[in-house]
Amino acid sequence: MAAASGARALNGAAEPPPAIERLVERYLRRLEIELGRSRHTVAAYRRDLGVYRRGLAAAGIDSLEAVDAGLVERYAMTLRDGSATGRPLGPASVGRMLSAVKGLHRFALEEGLVAEDVTTDVRPPKPAMRLPKALTIEQVAALLDATGGEAPQRIRDRALLELLYATGARVSEAVDLDVDDWMQSDEVIRLTGKGAKQRIVPVGSMARAAVDDYLVRVRPGFAAAGRGTPALFLGARGARLSRQSAFLIIRDAGRRAGIPTEHLSPHVLRHSFATHLLSGGADVRVVQELLGHASVATTQIYTKVTADSLRDAYLLAHPRAR
């Protein structure tokens, strides 16, 4: 049944079978409760597995026992050609979605619900090595200056972007901060990263001043419109600022600063943080700790960025370089 059904389609919009839906919910609860995955990670897995469940439903499959490796391979093809999601996905996105699928099948095997994990030999596409895009120091300054002004939202936006650039925080780490996290010390901040791992990161004087200004002049008014959330960064209605709002904030500031916004996101400030530290002489292992990378190999990609910058400057400046 698996092969025949899988050959028909994996890209329809049929309702997911209840049995698989219940299994997915059990798996997500395990990720959250037993493994301590963040709510952002669990939400991403829920979205990715929703695509997989709908694909199985369209293929007439109502149990993971009816899935074989060939069907999972074909599912990966529908992700690449866009028939499963409405738009083609790159290798990194396909790999992420396959990771969720492989995790679900592994969980089903551990729970004794299937005889084997058919995804064991399914390999995600190898993504092309892409260097992080970082802003120049001048562009960062222009971006932050674009949040100037006395409007409450501008004061909050400046505090958020100053903090992102000063600490290299992921956007989820920044919007998850509570006021108590900030008040513990005026020189460092505790960030909670992937896998609920915590790290201590120094906060520069300009970011401290911007956040303190927001706390005194803006947050009380925003908080009065809400229901008493402890969140550090609030929207005008008093609710915790969302990741999506943070994206809009940096895009809006980028437009005002004259910076191309096509690929501008809060994560660009994280890339810029790492690149500028390494360019300034910081040790790669120190930057690894500040970013919360599990492996120094992840951080070392930024050394390639700075090496390329040095090479370009050399080629432009040295009279006998070319």
Image (cartoon, rainbow, N blue to C red):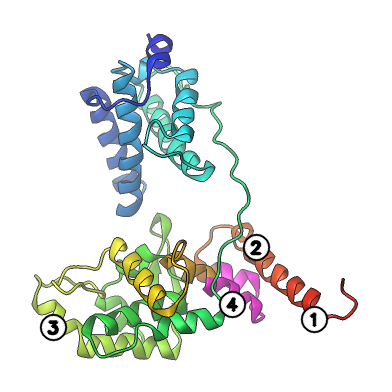
Q: Which residue is pictured at 32% across the width and 53% down the height?
A: 40
Please state the extent of the stretch shown in magenta in the rendering.
272-288
Label 2 with label 4: CB-CB less than 8 Å: no
Question: What is the magenta segment's predominant secondary structure?
Answer: helix
Task: Say above or below: 221 vs 302.
Answer: below
- Does the magenta segment cover residue 258? no
What kind of element bears circle 1? helix
Front: mark 1 or 4: 1
Q: CA distance from mark 1 to mark 4?
A: 21 Å
- Answer with mark 2 or mark 1, whichever residue precedes in sequence: 2
Q: Residue at x 30, y 28 (%)?
A: 54
Residue for badge 3? 221
Left of 104 or right of it: where is 270?
Answer: right
Looking at numbered disc 2 in the image, what kind of residue is underneath it? Gln
Q: What amino acid is labelled 1 in the image? A: Ala
Q: Answer above or below: position of 100 versus 294.
A: above
Circle nearer the N terminus (3, 2)? 3
Task: Check residue 281 for magenta coloring.
Answer: yes
Q: Secondary structure at mark 3?
A: helix
* Secondary structure found at label 4: helix
x then y, percent, for residue 89? 46, 41
**Which labelled disc corresponds to residue 300?**
2
Mark in front: 2 vs 4: 4
Measured from the top left, where is residue 211 in percent x and y? Answer: 32, 85
The answer to whether the residues at label 2 and label 1 have Cβ atoms under 8 Å apart is: no
From the image, tell me which residue sits under label 4.
276
Q: Earlier in the sequence, mark 3 or mark 1?
A: 3
Q: Amino acid at mark 4?
A: His
Q: Is residue 287 left or right of residue 16?
A: right
